Image (cartoon, rainbow, N blue to C red):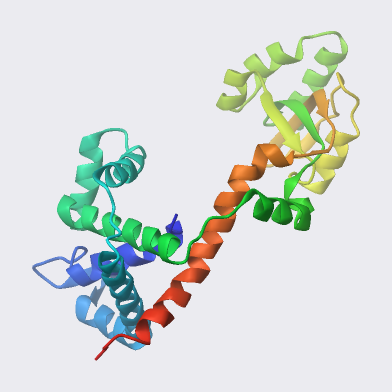
Amino acid sequence: SISQEAFMIKLAMFILMSGGLLNSQTNIVSTVNGEKITMDELRNRMTLNYFAKTLDEAIGDKLIIQEAKKRNISVSKDELNNAISQIKQRFTKEDDFKKELKRIGISEKDYYSMIENNLLIEKAIITILNINPTDEDAKKYYESNPSQFDIPEALRVRQIFVNTEQEAKDILIALEAGANFERLAEIKSADESLRQSKGDLGFISKGTLLTDIENEIFSTPIGKYTKPIRTGNGYSIFKVEEKREQSKLKFEDVKEKIKELIKSSQIQNGRQQLINQLKDKATIK
C-alpha cells in the first residue's frame, strides 16, 4: 500500500491548504510564547519551500487518475469500505473518528475522496505496470538478504525492580533463602506493570539491552537470577527462565510478507516511471 509517510504528507498539505487548522477569526495557526504564526506567514514559507514539489505531486496524481479512468480502472465500494474500516479500527468508537475529522476540519466526504484517490493511484500503478511479485522474486530477495530473517538468541526473563540498593539486597537474601521469585515480583516491585505480570518480561533478544545489563543476564544460567543491577532510577534483579537459540525464519513462513514488501517498493519506484510516461503525451500548463 502507499506508505504511511507519503499519505500523511498529502493529508497534512490538504489540511493546511483547506484552512482546517485555522482560527477563522484571527488567521492564526499557532502561538509561540505568545507570538503569533499566521496563515499568511505559513503560506509564504510553503510557497518558498514546498510549492514546486507539491504542485508536481498534484500533477502526477492527476495524470495517474486520468489514465486510470481511461483504462476503466476503478476502486470498488468494498475496497474503499475495507480501507476506511481499517482506519476506523484505530479509534475506540465511530464517534471518536468523526470528532477527529471535525477537529482537523475535513468532512467525511472529502476524507473518503482522498482515500479513494490514493487507492485508485496505487491500483493503477499495479495494473498498468503489471506489478505482481512471484515466489521466485521472493526467494531471490530471501537469499540476498539473509540477515533480515535471522532470529537472534533470546531469553525469557522476569524482573523485580525496587527503588533502593538496600531493598534489592534484601530481596536477594530472600531469594537465596528459597523465596519464590514470581511472588516477590508481585508484591515487592516498585513498578505496577511488573507487579501485575509477576515480573514476566517475555523473551528478550540479544542486542536489545544496554551492554552491561545484557552481559549479566545472558551469562546467567537458566533458572538462576542475577545480582542487583542498577537500572534507571533504581535496582533490578533478573531471573532467566528459558532460552531460545538463534535461528532463521523459514522462507515459506515469510514468503507472502516478502512479496508485499517487493510490491510496495515496486509501486513506489513505478509511480515516477508511470508519471514520466504520461507527461510525455500530456498537455500541462
Residue 157, percent from left and from top = 75, 27
Residue situated in front as seen by the camera: 282 or 186: 282
Q: Is 120 located above or below residue 202 in the figure?
A: below
Residue extending farthest to the bottom is 285
Q: Quadrant of the C terminus?
A: bottom left
Q: Residue at x 54, y 57 (%)?
A: 263
Report the residue at 43% width, 59% height from top.
Answer: 2
Quadrant where the image shows the N terminus: bottom left
**Relative depth, front residue between 126 and 122:** 126
Please tell me in which quadrant of the rendered image residue 280 appears: bottom left
Q: How many numbered tags mark residues here? A: 0
Q: Is residue 94 left or right of residue 172?
A: left
* 79 on left or right of 134: left
Q: Residue 109 location in percent, x, y?
A: 16, 53
Most distant residue in the front direction: 71
**x and y percent of residue 215 in the render?**
87, 41
Q: Which corner quadrant of the image does residue 121 belong to?
A: bottom left
Q: Residue at x 32, y 71 (%)?
A: 61
Q: Nearer the viewer, residue 156 or 253?
A: 253
User: For this view, does 281 lie left or right of residue 210?
Assistant: left
Q: Could one spot residue 142 in this view of the protein?
A: yes
Does residue 33 show up? Answer: no
Residue 71 in percent (x, y) is at 30, 65
Outermost residue toward the left in this view? 25
State whether residue 25 is above or below residue 49.
above
